[in-house]
Amino acid sequence: MPSQWVVSPMEFVPTLHDSVKKVTEEVAIEIFAGVIHRTPYFTGNLRASWRIREGSEDLSTTTTGSALVPIGPPSIPKTLGKLPRYPTVYITNAIPYADVVENGSPKNPAAYMVKLTLESLRNT
């Protein structure tokens, strides 16, 4: 005789939704912290321009740093606030030279702050 469910599998759906939100938030914050940590700085503007937001891109930048007074990194949030059932989290940096720092150029070696962060997560 086949087993019967004592509890309907549908009762687990809210728990599944909560788990997806929690893991998405944890991974996004870990990536955000990793790219900040790996971003080289001279004025600090590139590092300070990392943004994290749910639902849409934040393309604002910070350009108040200088070689004499570099600006510090952005703060790393503990949570992203109220998230929808299946959140989409954007981690962005709108500084025009961010891609050159990430991938390098003929005169500058690549920093690979995004690539190395994602690779470090794959290895855990």
Image: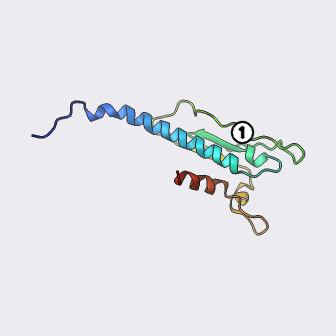
In the picture, residue 18 is in which quadrant?
top left
Colouring: rainbow
Q: Residue furthest left?
A: 1
Residue 58 image point, x, y percent? 65, 42
Q: Amino acid at mark 1?
A: Pro
| Whether residue 93 is visible | no
Quadrant the N terminus occupies:
top left
To which residue does mark 1 refer? 74
- Residue drawn at x 72%, y 51% is 39
Residue 116 image point, x, y percent? 62, 56
- Given residues 66 and 55, the one toward you in this image is 66
Q: How many marks?
A: 1
Q: Is residue 118 left or right of residue 64?
A: left
- Residue drawn at x 38%, y 31% is 14
Q: Is residue 17 left or right of residue 66?
A: left
| Whether residue 97 is visible | yes
Instruction: Name the element at disc 1.
Output: loop
Residue 17 image point, x, y percent? 41, 35
- Residue drawn at x 72%, y 39% is 74
- Given residues 122 and 64, the one toward you in this image is 122
Q: Residue furthest front?
A: 124
- Residue drawn at x 69%, y 47% is 37
In the picture, residue 57 is in which quadrant?
top right
**Compared with residue 90, is residue 6 higher up or lower down, i.e. above or below?**
above
